[in-house]
Image: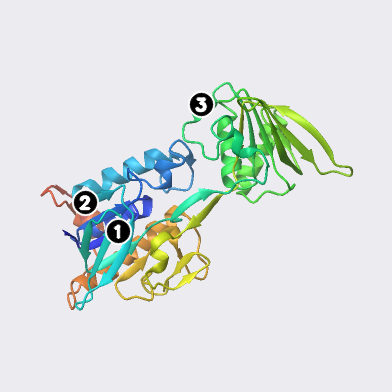
Amino acid sequence: MIETDILIIGAGPTGLFTVFEAGLLKLKCHLIDALPQPGGQCSEIYPKKPIYDIPAYPEILAGDLTEKLLEQGKQFKPGFTLGERAETIEKLEDGSFIVTTDKGTKHHAPVVAIAGGLGSFEPRKPPIHNISAFEDKGVNYIIKDPEVYRNKRVVIAGGGDSALDWTIYLADLAKEVTLIHRRNEFRGALDSVEKVQELKNQGRVKLITPAEVTSLVGDHKLEAVVVTQAQHIQKEFEIETDFFIPLFGLSPKLGPIANWGLEIEKNAIKVNNALDYQTNIPGIFAIGDVNTYPGKLKLILCGFHEATLMCQAAYQIINPGKKYVLKYTTVSGIDGFDGTRKEAPKAVIKSIN
């Protein structure tokens, strides 16, 4: 039986940041993740994708963000159960929980924080009749290593942030990049739309709208895509390419967590955001992309905020009646579980006092 203060289900960015915030409160964390390494989607799906909305980082690769979060939290010595899926949960008479994985590993904690991101997921595939024949033979649904596309011809399909971001990124890497979207309007960030338009004007990417890839051509590997363009009169034409990357998002699934008696809305866990992101079951919290509430934004930085408030509530559950006085780290410094201490700069303390 693994004992901990806060059991975190999901080792993505939100789960990893929870380790740090809990550590400031002298609370021990253990994380469970079905993936074999920490980082969630940032490590498994797009480690080389740049992220632009992390405070203090104008740009940081998803994989590098994972490494920074691990470094930030390591002083609090979190435990990890990786490559195992949280399967069942049992609430004991004292209000604590036992969570058992699909491999039988048991974990005991007074607080459970579900930070599973989108849960288990699979890419949404376009309705192209022969697409399965070209999977891993030129058709990729996820970009893990951009170097694969260096000096190659790439066709990307989609209208969201992923399609726009990868079009911008690969414009400096690939031999030729074509972005195809079935509408003239895009769903991604306005800044990204403007960058793609600028790249088009510079002749560095090709933009075809409104249009769809309707068929794939090739013998043993992908050689071309068939594009149907919707104008006054529909027309079809081929584009020779080495890779076709349809980026239509992920189809999320909560998996076994959906059977834990939690209140679910549109495949997300409902929480009380007016207080502490607790679910309908006292002692179980949901933070990050896995939760939902009025005004919810699925952003990593929002998950960080939710994790911070959740840890404050967890402290009260674990230490009933004990008052915690919030201190800024600029004043208090940081005491790690390994006995190390990072002192706050004395000049800062003096100015505050």
* Front one among 220 and 257: 220
Choose between 235 and 167: the one closer to the eye: 235
Q: Give whichever of discs 3 and 1 has the lower sequence position.
A: 1
> Mark 1: which amino acid?
Ile
Disc 3 target residue: 148
Is residue 57 visible in the rendered image? The answer is no
Q: Mark 2 points at which residue?
A: 79
Q: Which residue: 61% across, 25% down? A: 220
Snapshot quadrant of residue 233: top right
**Contact (CB < 8 A) between labels 3 and 2?**
no
Q: Distance between the residues labelled 1 and 2?
A: 10 Å
Left or right of 78 on screen, residue 203: right
- Asked whether the residues under the numbered discs 1 and 2 touch, taking CB atoms below 8 Å apart as contact, a structural biologist would say no
Residue 269 higher or lower than 24, as above or below:
below
Residue that sits furthest to the left in the current view: 339
Q: Position of residue 174 (x, y in %)?
A: 58, 25
| Quadrant (top left/top right/bottom left/bottom right) for the N terminus | bottom left
Type of the residue with mark 3: Val
Label 3: state its secondary structure. Answer: helix
Tag 1 residue? 8
Residue 255 at what x, y percent from top left? Answer: 42, 59
First of labels 3, 2 by sequence position = 2
Residue 341 lies, with reference to residue 50, above or below; the image says below
**Is residue 260 in view from this perspective?**
yes
Looking at the image, do the residues carrying marks 3 and 1 touch, with CB atoms under 8 Å apart? no
The image quadrant of residue 163 is top right
- Depth check: give the residue in front, 70 or 197: 70
Which quadrant would the C terminus be assigned to in this image?
bottom left
Q: Is disc 2 placed on a helix, strand or loop?
A: strand
